[in-house]
Image (spheres, rainbow, N blue to C red):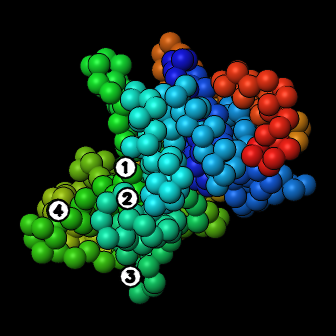
């Protein structure tokens, strides 16, 4: 679907490289630029097998790996020449550093006014904090997410995965597609896309903003409860498993009472009316929890599925992989790899009727594609490439 789109990914770690990964899954040519010697820090981040970073292998799927020292003037000029041949440049270097190197958007657009540049930073390209370094943890804290997450009497809670980075990467990927559409369909020039690690996640927490702006409510942590629906929680079964339930739809919420043998509550206005039920959310939770505690997970799920209740088991990774629904949809794919033999990764997420996303290969070795990319993109000879290598530019 994106054949003919060339992306230059000179970012590191998670959010910005992930945006490039999504484009590469649907046919964009993605060239990954890394510092000679060490490469992207994500190569050494998280779980390793025999010295091979597992997250690197997934995040850098379908990318061609090239080394280039952007701290050197010769490397900076090579990058500018490459940007002339690209549709998209992805970066997450601090703004002042890119300006110093002459690799900021204003400098690159002089060479290619059709260029779309995605620049993801911790705080954004404007404002008093724009030059501060930032990671996803800061976004999770400042967006309001951590404040709302956790038990009422416990500390603010951070996720054990890349939430802010992931949400930012998804916003970034669709922003790139909008910029390319604007350029290619409406005849506009390229443009700069400014995304940080706070705004996208804060956008998902708008319930807090709306309630405060109109009602003066400052929400606090309430565990797995949510003040817009009841029941809504996780419940433990008698065999030590957990299930989650949502009563967001009024009709589904009433089915819960029928399913657990409490049709009397469905007929009681204090429980049948959504707003009055919220005022008694603790009682609703206790009634459901007491019933679930007498059932095995399979037994409880059988009843809820029969009655059309929105409930689901809480999975660990082994149960996730074994689920028949996810298996039927091919959510996980096993990919051959020269370093690991094979590795199972998530398949591309969007499903289209006519074209499929694909994982051609996992993350390559450092500089694996130097010779072919520099020869094909910049018409450098083997002698010139060897000279760059000898001078430490690549």
Residue at the spot of label 2: 124
Q: Nearer the viewer, residue 202 or 97?
A: 97
Label 2: state its secondary structure.
loop
Q: Earlier in the sequence, mark 3 or mark 4?
A: 3
**Of pointers 4 and 1, the one earlier in the residue sequence:** 1
Q: Position of residue 191 (x, y in %)?
A: 35, 36
The mark found on residue 365 in the picture is none
Spatial CA span between label 3 and label 4: 21 Å
322 or 143: nearer the viewer? 143
Q: Secondary structure at mark 1?
A: strand
Q: Secondary structure at mark 4?
A: helix
Alpha carbon of mark 2 to alpha carbon of mark 1: how far? 6 Å
The residue under label 4 is 210
Residue at 64% x, 55% y is: 71
Q: Tag 1 or tag 2, which sits nearer the N-term?
A: 2
Q: At x 30% / y 78%, what residue is drawn? A: 220
Q: Residue furthest top?
A: 354
Label of residue 194 in the image: 1
Mark 2 surroundings: few (<14), some (14-19) or many (≥20) residues within 10 A: many
Q: Tag 3 or tag 1, which sits nearer the N-term?
A: 3
Residue of label 3 = 152
Cα gap from disc 3 to disc 2, whole angstroms: 32 Å
Q: Are marks 2 and 1 in contact (CB under 8 Å)?
A: yes
What crowding class fits label 3: few (fewer than 14 Cα within 10 Å), some (14-19), or many (20 or more)?
A: some
Locate residue 174: give its quadrant: top left
């Amino acid at each position: 679907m994106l054949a003919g789109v060339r992306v230059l990914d000179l970012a590191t770690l998670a959010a910005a490289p992930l945006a490039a990964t999504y484009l590469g899954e649907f046919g964009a040519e993605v060239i990954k630029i890394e510092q000679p010697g060490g490469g992207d820090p994500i190569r050494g981040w998280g779980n390793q097998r025999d010295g091979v970073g597992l997250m690197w292998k997934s995040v850098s799927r379908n990318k061609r790996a090239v080394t280039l020292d952007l701290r050197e003037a010769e490397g900076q000029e090579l990058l500018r020449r490459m940007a002339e041949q690209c549709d998209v440049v992805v970066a997450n270097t601090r703004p002042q550093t890119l300006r110093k190197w002459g690799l900021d958007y204003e400098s690159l657009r002089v060479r290619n006014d059709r260029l779309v540049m995605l620049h993801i930073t911790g705080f954004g390209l404007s404002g008093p904090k724009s030059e501060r370094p930032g990671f996803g943890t800061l976004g999770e804290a400042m967006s309001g997410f951590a404040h709302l997450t956790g038990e009422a009497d416990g500390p603010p809670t951070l996720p054990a995965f890349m939430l802010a980075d992931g949400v930012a990467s998804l916003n970034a990927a669709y922003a790139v597609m909008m910029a390319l559409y604007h350029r290619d369909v409406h005849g506009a020039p390229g443009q700069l896309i400014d995304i940080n690690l706070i705004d996208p996640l804060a956008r998902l927490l708008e319930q807090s903003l709306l309630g405060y702006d109109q009602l003066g409510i400052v929400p606090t942590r309430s565990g797995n409860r949510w003040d817009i629906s009841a029941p809504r929680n996780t419940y433990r079964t008698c065999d030590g498993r957990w299930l989650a339930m949502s009563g967001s739809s009024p009709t589904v919420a009433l089915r819960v009472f029928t399913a657990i043998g409490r049709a009397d509550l469905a007929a009681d206005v204090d429980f049948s009316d959504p707003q009055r039920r919220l005022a008694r959310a603790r009682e609703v939770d206790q009634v459901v929890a007491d019933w679930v505690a007498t059932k095995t997970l399979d037994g409880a799920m059988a009843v809820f599925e029969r009655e059309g209740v929105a409930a689901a088991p809480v999975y660990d990774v082994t149960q996730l992989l074994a689920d028949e629904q996810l298996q039927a949809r091919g959510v996980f794919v096993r990919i051959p790899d020269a370093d690991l033999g094979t590795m199972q990764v998530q398949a591309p997420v969007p499903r289209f009727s006519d074209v499929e996303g694909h994982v051609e290969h996992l993350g390559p070795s450092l500089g694996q594609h130097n010779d072919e990319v520099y020869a094909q993109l910049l018409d450098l000879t083997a002698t010139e490439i060897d000279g760059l290598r000898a001078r430490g530019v690549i």
